Amino acid sequence: MLDKNIMKKLTFLQKGEITDYLIYTKLAKKQKSEHNQSILNKIAEDELGHYEFLKHHTNKTIKQNHFKVMFFFIIARFLGLTFGIKLMERGEEKTQAIYHELLGKVEGIQSLIDDEERHEKELINALDEEKLNYIGSIVLGLNDALVELTGTLAGLTFAFAEAKAVALAGLITGIAASLSMGSSEYLSTKQESSHSFALKSALYTGVAYIFAVIFMILPYLLINNVYLSLAVTIGVVILIIFVFNYYISVAKDLSFRKRFLEMVSISLGVALISFGIGVLVKEVIGIDI
């Protein structure tokens, strides 16, 4: 007979397993790729097996966490399958700790721990998601837009000192740069890959650049004070860098802190230098627009 503390832990784990089973099952049904569908169904089968194993010890039928099922299903559908699943797995520290606490107390627990580790190391990493194949192109587009346009807007802010003029110049510069980046990405990628892959890489690069441009010039369109607009734009840049690097750190298992600080330092450094150039153009050379 298991004591109350162990029974409570088993019940908690049982609820988690049936919840994860339903998440993987729902996601599998939405997959067009048979490869991904097969992987998700395999994980779902394991989770159901874990639930049945735990049910054998608790003699209870436990219902799923409906909120968690819907939350991670929506996250995976809108932000990417790999991101959604890995984000879910990152929240399983408590579950893993409890499983290890039960070693030697409940027979057969080690096999469940081995399954959970296999899910992350082998099965989840084997998922094939198109957008992650083009992550390098997205990084290129975002990084260039954030660095180049932050510098451009900072320089224009002091040179023009008029929000709408800065927005117009920034938009023209941004669109031209996005087309240039996209075409450059196509030409460089075409040397090593197929026409289709090169074209998609170019589109991902260009679209990522354009989205960054839109968010960065919005403050200049909505706020009349040009210096306040620049301050808000810098805040937007930091937010974009934060969100993007968090996404990449989860989806690709990369270091968040290092990449985030590196991109912020480069973007703000370029902005500071460009702002100084704007001061030089206006005050020293005497060009005033």
Image (tube, rainbow, N blue to C red):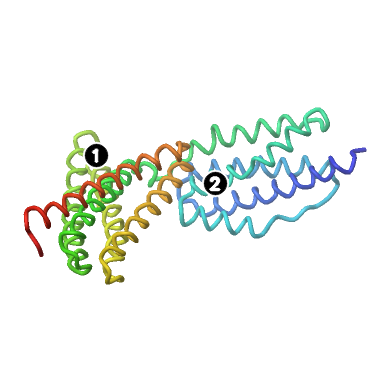
**Looking at the image, which residue is at 26% across and 47% down?**
147
Is 70 in front, or is 261? 261
Whole-percent x and y of residue 37?
52, 46
Q: Residue furthest front?
A: 284
Tags 2 and 1 touching, CB below 8 Å: no
Which residue has dot 1 on it?
A: 194
Please, what is the three-letter code of the amino acid marked with disc 1? Answer: Ser
Secondary structure under the numbered disc 2 in the rendered image: helix
Is 211 in front, or is 158? 158
Q: Residue 175's quadrant in the figure?
A: bottom left
Please, what is the three-letter code of the amino acid marked with disc 2? Answer: Leu
Is 127 in front, or is 163? 163
Q: Residue 283's quadrant in the figure?
A: bottom left
**Looking at the image, which residue is at 18% across and 52% down?**
177
Q: In the figure, is residue 116 to the left or right of 4?
A: left
Q: Quadrant of the C terminus?
A: bottom left
Which residue has dot 2 on it?
A: 87
Q: In the figure, is residue 268 to the left or right of 247?
A: left
Q: Alpha-carbon neighbours of circle 1 within 10 Å: few (<14), some, or many (≥20)? A: few
